[in-house]
Amino acid sequence: MSEIANIEELKKLAPPAELRRAPVVEGNQGLGWLTDKLSAFAEAKVPLWWKIAFVPAAFAATVIFPICLFYQVFTGVGVWGNNHPNMWGWDIVNFIWWVGVAHAGTLISAMLFLTRQHWRTTIGRMAEAMTVFSVMMAGLYPAIHVGRAWFDWFMFPIPNSNGNWPQFKSPLMWDVFAVNTYLMVSSLFWFMGMIPDFAVMRDRATTRARKAIFSLLAMGWTGSAWQWHNYEKAYVVLCGLCTLLVFTVSSIVGLDFCTSQLAGWHATIFPLYFVIGAVFCGFGMMLVLLTSLRKLCKLETIITKSHIDKVAKLCLVSGLIINYIYLMEIFIAWYSGDPYERWVFGHRFFGHNYAFFGWMLIGINVLLTQLLWIKKIRTNMVALFIIGLFINFGMWSERMVIVVGSTNQDFLPANWGLYHPTMWDIGLYVGTLGAFFMMYLLFVKFLPVIAISEVKGAVPHGDPHHPLGGAQKGGH
Amino acid sequence: MNEKIYGLMAEFNTPGDLLRAAEKIRGAGYSRWDCFTPFPIHGIDKVMGYRNSLVGWVALAGGAFMFLNVAGLIWFSNAFDYPLIVGGKPMFSVPMTFVPSYIMMIMGGAGGALIGMVALNQLPRLHHPLLFKKRFEGATRDKFIIVIGANDEKFCVTGTKQLLESIGGVNVEIVEDQE
């Protein structure tokens, strides 16, 4: 066969093994095998580990979460630990944390698409799902943090008999638009990416119910050249817009802080600080999800060690940028000569109230992250899982340092006070975690968890200019 | 021409085979035909003779619409209908207007891209003659399918079938029009 001769010739020309680019999917199997493999988990019976994970997540999401939510809404913000001078507590800490978790998802799915990184095809869908669900959790916090949740509609420009309009001079107002847009656009992006895969599930469906559901979701997708032509254009446009969102949403959250006069918040680096912090935290969550799901869903040949290694490298890069920002923040606090600024930063690490979180920030985000320099650790799934969990806690601590650490001791000793979360704070956080994992588990089980069509387009069998894709000598 | 026939479909095994076949069908002068593939094939746009997709323009229109509308809304609500002095800042200025307008521009652009894609692809549609064919299920799996429409001027069941077989198409079948 001429094809095999071609492969032999190619092998002679190929660079040595250590310089070769890792294949997107291991095993070099055909397209049919890939389709079976990628849709196997969604079509198989519900495995035991899934049920074991789902029950506590669903309990947190459907019992703890509503109880804490409704008790707070019916009683008031006073049920939380928020009180003068700490008007922002865990509600805002968790809001920023959840927005942060979202960001790496968009970065992986959108920015790596624009830079034509084929390896993203295997993890992009999981990353997008992470974005959508965590933005949902994030958006909830400001909505109830305002205290009277039934007046939330005041934040939207709706003509009303009181004649009041939103006050657009405040970044807090911009936040409303930013978070809502982020939720809308990432959901659109997620859904649009799934349309061709819904068609795959539709054509593979064995029961009437599955056929009907996936037919509706696929909207009659046939995969014609014309459809792909428009689809690809829309995908590029959405990727570009999502990339803008990565930089905009957390910047605006950063502006909420830095437009105030408070020492520790009043810094021009904040928008960048929040963007990079968000991405770093999200990569931590990505490591947790990828390392566990590739094993549990038996996707080791699809989400290869090489892909995880790359995610870990990106995590390290964003970690190094955040380390630089920490250094710069401390330097500027000293260089500004402002005694209040210096006081706040001194107390972050040597005060007696919240120094623990300050040292967690140094210990995890600065020191522990350096472990990712080591190749052995980047290819050790257990180590990455643990590091991912730690990074999430480290970034949570960072938000704690920023929000509570700056408000608890400001300019006047009369304004000094301690913040402690109450059981309602903790319950709500547990509830959002439960809701996130419940939705994620449902997604993993019932929807195409890996972008089937994208992966097929990224393997040699799908490349018309590769011998395996049917290329012949002298053009296609 | 039989009104009951939607067209003829032929299967190919690799994207390379499909591209070569598509070039030949185009060369034979057919105009109403399409390729159905499990993923976008690099180079197919050129063979099919597609120009730049209009989706980008729809997205641009959506983005511009939202940007101007939100900027206008901010002017109307904060500077015209209910002027409110906050910190001595101007009633209407670029820094206060740009960020929300820009964010909503992204929303408009994304909505435009999705709506443009769905509309140009004539989705959603719950019925398509091809979706009744058992063999067409390969188009979302590992087969590359070409369908020549019966409404093509050059369409002729035997002649077109011969052409499809001569360029390497297998399992050439008639697609019935199930109206």
Image (cartoon, coloured by chain):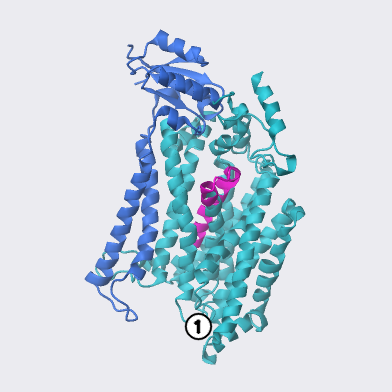
- Residue found at the very far left of the displayed protein: B81
Rate crowding at label 1 as few (under 14), some (14 to 19) or many (20 or more) other CA atoms within 10 Å: some
Judged left or right of residue B83, residue B140 is right
Chain letter behind tag 1? A
Q: Colour of chain B?
A: blue
- Would residue A158 be seen by someone viewing this image from the given angle? no
- Residue A150 place in picture, x, y as percent: 38, 66
- Residue found at the very far bottom of the displayed protein: A413
The amino acid pointed to by label 1 is: His
Q: In this picture, which residue range is highlighted in magenta?
A: A110-139
Q: Colour of chain A?
A: cyan
Residue A120 among those drawn in magenta: yes
Q: Main secondary structure of the magenta part?
A: helix
Q: Residue at x 48, y 66 (%)?
A: A251
Q: Quadrant of the N terminus of chain A?
A: top right
**Pick the front one: A220 or A452:** A452
Q: Quadrant of the C terminus of chain A?
A: top right
**Pick the front one: A346 or A196:** A346
**Pick the front one: A465 or A422:** A465
Residue B70 among those drawn in magenta: no
**Pick the front one: A429 or A269:** A269
- Residue A206 place in picture, x, y as percent: 55, 28
Pointer 1 residue: A84
